[in-house]
Image (cartoon, rainbow, N blue to C red):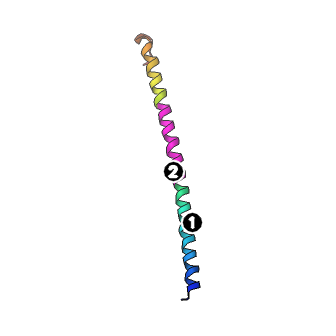
Amino acid sequence: MNLEHQNVQFDDLAQVLHNANLRRSADLSSWLRQYLRRQREIKAWAATADLRNKIASFIPHRHRAI
């Protein structure tokens, strides 16, 4: 194997690894966005439930729907 051929193989390998890293980063970005969106949704639901419970605490018991 000559030196030029080894350099070409090394460059090809470097490109493959770079592309794999980009794909992995893109996958991670997508996962992170989805995770953060789910966390915001969970917090919104929790805040809504908390608000609903606070409002319900002001309503006399006989007027509450069961």
Quadrant in which the N terminus appears: bottom right
**What residue do we see at 54% from left, 52% from top?**
29
Name the quarter where the C terminus is drawn. Answer: top left
* First along the sequence among labels 1 and 2: 1
Residue at left offset 57%, top offset 70%: 15
Tell me if residue 57 comes above or below residue 34 in the rendering: above
Give the x, y percent position of residue 18: 55, 66
User: What is the CA distance from the residue labelled 1 to the residue labelled 2?
Assistant: 18 Å
Q: Which mark, by number, is residue 52?
A: none
Where does the magenta region start and end? 28-45
Q: Position of residue 17 (x, y in %)?
A: 53, 68
What is the crowding at mark 1: few (fewer than 14 residues within 10 Å), some, or many (at least 20)?
few
What secondary structure is found at the residue carrying circle 2? helix
The kind of residue tagged 2 is Trp
Instruction: Determine which residue is flagged by label 1.
Output: 19
Q: Nearer the viewer, mark 1 or mark 2?
A: 1
**Circle 2 residue:** 31
Q: Is residue 4 above or below residue 41?
A: below
Q: What residue lies at 42% left-to-right and 16% top-to-bottom? A: 57
Identified at 53% across, 56% down, the residue is: 27
Residue found at the far front of this picture: 3
